[in-house]
Image (cartoon, coloured by chain):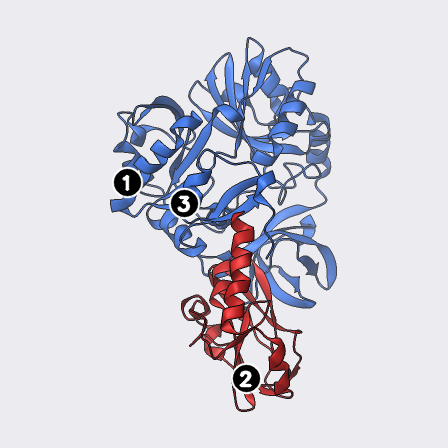
Chain colours: A red, B blue
Amino acid sequence: MYPTDYRYTKDHEWVKVNGSTGTIGITDYAQNELGDVVFVEFPKVGVRVEAGKSFGTVESVKAVSELFCPLSGEVAEINSQLSDTPEKINQDPHGAAWLIRVKLSNPNEIASLMDAKAYEAYIATKTREQSA
Amino acid sequence: MTTQATTELRKTALHSTHRRMGAKMVNFGGWDMPLEYSGILSEHEAVRTRAGLFDVSHMGEIEVRGGSALDLVQHVTCNDASKLAVGQAQYSGLMTARGTFVDDLLVHKISDRHYFLCVNAANQDGDFAHIRANNPMGAGVENSGERFSQLAIQGPKAASILAQLTAIRVGELKYYSFTFGDICDVDCLIARTGYTGEDGFEIYFEPRHSEQLWNHFLEAGSADGLIPCGLGARNTLRMEAGMCLYGNEIDETTTPWEAGLGWICKLEKGAFLGRGVLAEQKHAGVQRKLIGFEMLDKRIGRDGYPVTISGRPEGRVTSGGPSPTLKKNIGMAYVPPDQSAVGIQIGIEIRGQSAPARIVALPFYNRHRK
């Protein structure tokens, strides 16, 4: 379910690092919690983003959720297709519905993120809390 | 996302069914209720084009009985219950002495000596206390929410699905009428009412039959595309229909005139709680008026967001969000009456930026009636 070459945040974003570029999206758990996604607010290309800081919002019919950047850097690309097809975030959150690409300024930050196994354990505790 | 510990929450008789069927649950007014099953958008569409089934057993019921039952109902509500024939229901407001809403409700006339009130879940106990405290005529008042479950079947296919399960000729029941009858051998009060802007029925019965009826409906309706729905779709549906939600559009600070509910405010019926204030306000005019708006770009104005007109703050959005049927983002808000005309541009403050919106007529959505 959760790709092993991605890293994950406690706020349910993922990042896939390729050289000095990080591709960022929200996790399947996050899209499922949100429900039908209807709107994404992107940062502008070229702005600086910081690990742990907000870089935009994703909205479902019912809720607004801030997006927190897993790693610091400069926004190199946004997935502007999602402006017209935000529902792709529900359909393919780990693939076609990536949100932004970031030119990383400090790739070492990745050490603080969870791997797939740790993230799965993390969301398992969340799911237990909810059904308690 | 926060989920309150479910141990403190109240549960309907269908709670375990919802959990088993995989509904996403939410705390609504102290009740652990289904927010969505398959998704708000698909559930919304099912109700607009086919049919949806809602467990609304959290809704409260209060019964008023005795020779002075009508007198009490007339005294505490603003609509004219004397106009009801046996088997008719009306939308009304439970009023404070200031002419504001303790709650909004449906008043059903079962007989000259028996009125059945359907009230909001979170207000039930407060409503009951308020009605008892304003009962000098000594009518019998029962807080009977625990004796009833309620299912709502809503949508253009609702009547034909329901007709499969009962000998009652439900297709002939008029809008805002009700009757008693068996559905799958369960004794029910069947009302042609709803909170979706679509044709449909609200059905009241003893809680022990809940799962049986729920399953019968789903089975009978599956060929017609009936699906289980949650409170998320109920909210988007009622918003499109321009219907007020207690706690959002109406509360103890708003009057029927302000909320666009003048049609349920019958001053000519005689004395009732708040009548003096309401008569005065009708004469003097209101200071604010509920309007509908649509967003002019893709941003979404939501509950509580600040509203501006010509840059000046003018209150907050009462309800706002996507309209799945109209494919626009819509909402409601209170504005000064002289700036409430259709077409006026307003601003909705979204995360520190003003997003343009335009006042439009309510309701946003009107179903085609046969």
Q: Residue at x 60, y 12 (%)?
A: B139
Q: Which residue is mark 3?
A: B20
Q: Amino acid at mark 2?
A: Gly
Instruction: Provide the chain ID for the residue under circle 2.
Output: A
Tag 3: residue type?
A: Arg
* Pick the front one: B146 or B63: B146
The CA span between labels 1 and 3 is 17 Å
Left or right for B308, reference A78: right
For the C terminus of chain B, give its image quadrant.
top left
Q: Position of residue B108 (x, y in %)?
A: 48, 24
**Quadrant in the picture for the N terminus of chain B:** bottom right
The residue tagged 1 is B219
Left or right relative to B172: residue B308: right
Q: Name the residue at 27% across, 31% down.
A: B165
x 60%, y 76%: residue: A70
Mark 3 vs mark 2: tell me if same chain. Answer: no
For residue B276, above or below residue B156 = above
The residues bearing labels 1 and 2 have C-alpha atoms spaced at a distance of: 49 Å
Question: As displayed, is residue A39 above or below residue B334?
Answer: below
Determine the residue positioned at 31% across, 29% down: B170
Where disc 2 sits, the SS reads strand
Chain under numbered label 1: B
Q: What's the chain of the residue with tag 3?
A: B
In the picture shown, does residue B62 fall above or below B34? above
Q: Amino acid at mark 1?
A: Glu
